[in-house]
Amino acid sequence: MGNFEPRIVAFLCNWCAYAGADLAGVSRLQYPPNIRTVRVMCSGRVDPLFVLEAFKDGCDGVLVAG
Amino acid sequence: MSSAEAQRFVEVVTTVTESVKSQGKFDPKALSSELAAAEMTLAGETLRWMVGKEVKITTDGDVYGRKWDTETFESVLDAVLEREYQKNLIYQAVKDGSTSVRDINEKIGLDLERISYLLADLEKTNKVEFTGMEDSKPVFAVL
């Protein structure tokens, strides 16, 4: 389990979390490379079915940030 | 978080990654019937009806004029969703060949009485049908 690198789907709101992620990049802050970002116009756009779909396609975790 | 909170974003991503790492790999094949049941529950009309009514019932009140507080409404919503999920798990179990109450119990671990009760409900809504007796056990099939 030591070298297990999970794949995490991250639904990020365009106006907050995505901009935060962008700023983290610009500020050269380090964070784990395990997330795969999906930008949404609002975290309210995320349907619970999207989360299930991600799990069905074999990701290990889902993060919704707004 | 706000767009200025880059540090907060880094913290959240780090915490989530550590948490997922400690929980280990997710195997969708091992949980395929649970995932299918959850998908049926979330895609079903019951959830949409209830979520659609939430604001009205908690602010203006229900058809009897009773105003519900959010906690009460949400605990009812949780109970409804749990029941729908259990029904859908039973449906998936019948579909996958567990056709008697005892077989379903062995597959999903819900108690026998609850399974019989929910099967009756599935019959009423034309999701499952009673197909006859086999070794003096009632046998069901999905519709």
Image (spheres, coloured by chain):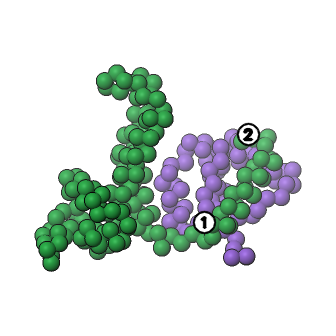
Chain colours: A purple, B green
Q: Residue under circle 2?
A: B2
Task: Provide the secondary structure element on which disc 1 rests.
Answer: loop
- Expressed as whole percent of the image width and height from the top left, the position of residue B10 reads 78, 53
Residue extending farthest to the right is: A28
- Expressed as whole percent of the image width and height from the top left, the position of residue B27 reads 54, 72
Q: Is residue B56 visible?
A: no
Callout 1 amino acid: Asp
Name the residue: 40% across, 33% down.
B53
The quadrant holding residue A1 is bottom right
Q: In which quarter of the image is the C terminus of chain A?
A: top right
User: Which of the pair B143/B73 is nearer the observer?
Assistant: B73
The chain to which mark 2 is attached is B
Callout 2 amino acid: Ser
Q: Can residue A44 be seen in this view?
A: yes
Mark 2 is surrounded, within 10 Å at the Cα level, by few (under 14), some (14 to 19) or many (20 or more) other residues, namely some
- Expressed as whole percent of the image width and height from the top left, the position of residue A29 reads 85, 54
Q: Are marks 1 and 2 in contact (CB under 8 Å)?
A: no
Please tell me whether residue B81 is drawn above or below residue B62 in the rendered image.
below
Q: Do labels 1 and 2 share a chain?
A: no
Q: Is residue B7 left or right of residue B122?
A: right
Q: Residue under circle 1?
A: A60
Name the residue: 32% across, 68% down.
B105
Q: Which of marks 1 and 2 is in front?
A: 1
